Image (spheres, coloured by chain):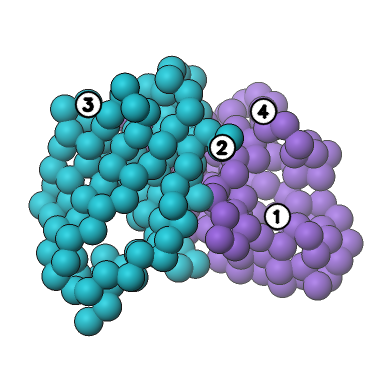
Amino acid sequence: GAVVSQHPSRVICKSGTSVKIECRSLDFQATTMFWYRQFPKQSLMLMATSNEGSKATYEQGVEKDKFLINHASLTLSTLTVTSAHPEDSSFYICSARDIAGNQETQYFGPGTRLLVL
Amino acid sequence: RKEVEQDPGPFNVPEGATVAFNCTYSNSASQSFFWYRQDCRKEPKLLMSVYSSGNEDGRFTAQLNRASQYISLLIRDSKLSDSATYLCVVNMANYQLIWGAGTKLIIKP
């Protein structure tokens, strides 16, 4: 099946620093990638939809200036958590839709666990 | 009311038993439905799609009841490796996925 990678897999940072997370589709092209956040024992919450070559679409309540998304190519989207604070500690997961495949299927990256001290 | 609701569990089930859990959704315009499996501290993985006529994949059977707006997952002859959180996912017309919070399943030897 299609493979999506994320880097880094985990990161610990000090409050106030910025953290960049990369999401790559390894063997397919993705015009659309999704960024989710999952707090312990809660469901995945969609943060934003990342569209190649255009601005990301953010869900209600997600600050676009805090969570910067760049989707510069058909295989790479990045999420930057700016001025991270402890409440941003979470599991961040990206997913991608294969433009050539079933549009309903999303392939997930392995996730990035962020801990802000 | 949440858009997608699941019993969080945990369901503690002896190995070999049959277990079933449901998921209800609130939006009647929902287009398609899926069950995902998520192991602890891992990303979700697609288990199976849910079709209107019901579908089976080995020990797993999924059913959809549009009239009552719920989907179900049945696991027969449960294995220790089935222990995980099972996430119900509803796909809206714009391909937006709405996720349930998951049902935790623990299979005991």
Q: Secondary structure at mark 2?
A: loop
Same chain check for tags 3 and 1: no
Question: In whole angstroms, how far apart are the C-alphas of marks 4 and 1?
Answer: 18 Å
Residue under label 4, please give it: A57
| Residue A52 locus on image (x, y percent) | 58, 29
Name the amino acid type tagged 4. Answer: Thr
Question: CB of mark 2 within 8 Å of CB of mark 4?
Answer: no
Question: In whole angstroms, how far apart are the C-alphas of marks 3 and 4?
Answer: 31 Å
Instruction: Name the residue at 16% across, 27% down.
Output: B53
Of all chains, the one bearing label 4 is A
Front position in the image: B71 or B83:
B71
Image-based side of A19 in relation to A53, left or right: right
| Residue A103 locus on image (x, y percent) | 37, 27
Residue under label 2, please give it: B2
Instruction: Name the residue at 35% across, 34% down.
Output: B70
| Residue B89 locus on image (x, y percent) | 41, 39
Which part of the image, by quadrant, shows the N terminus of chain B? top right
Please rate how many residues cluster around mark 1, counting C-alpha atoms within 10 Å: few if below 14, some from 14 to 19, many from 20. Answer: some
Question: In whole angstroms, how far apart are the C-alphas of marks 3 and 1?
Answer: 41 Å
Same chain check for tags 2 and 4: no
Name the amino acid type tagged 3. Answer: Ser
Question: In whole angstroms, how far apart are the C-alphas of marks 2 and 3?
Answer: 23 Å
Same chain check for tags 4 and 1: yes
Of all chains, the one bearing label 1 is A
Residue under label 1, please give it: A20
Please rate how many residues cluster around mark 2, counting C-alpha atoms within 10 Å: few if below 14, some from 14 to 19, many from 20. Answer: few
Q: Earlier in the sequence, mark 4 or mark 1?
A: 1
Choose mark 2 or mark 4, whichever is in front: 2
Please rate how many residues cluster around mark 4, counting C-alpha atoms within 10 Å: few if below 14, some from 14 to 19, many from 20. Answer: some
Instruction: Name the residue at 62% across, 26% down.
Output: A53
Q: Colour of chain A?
A: purple
Residue under label 3, please give it: B52
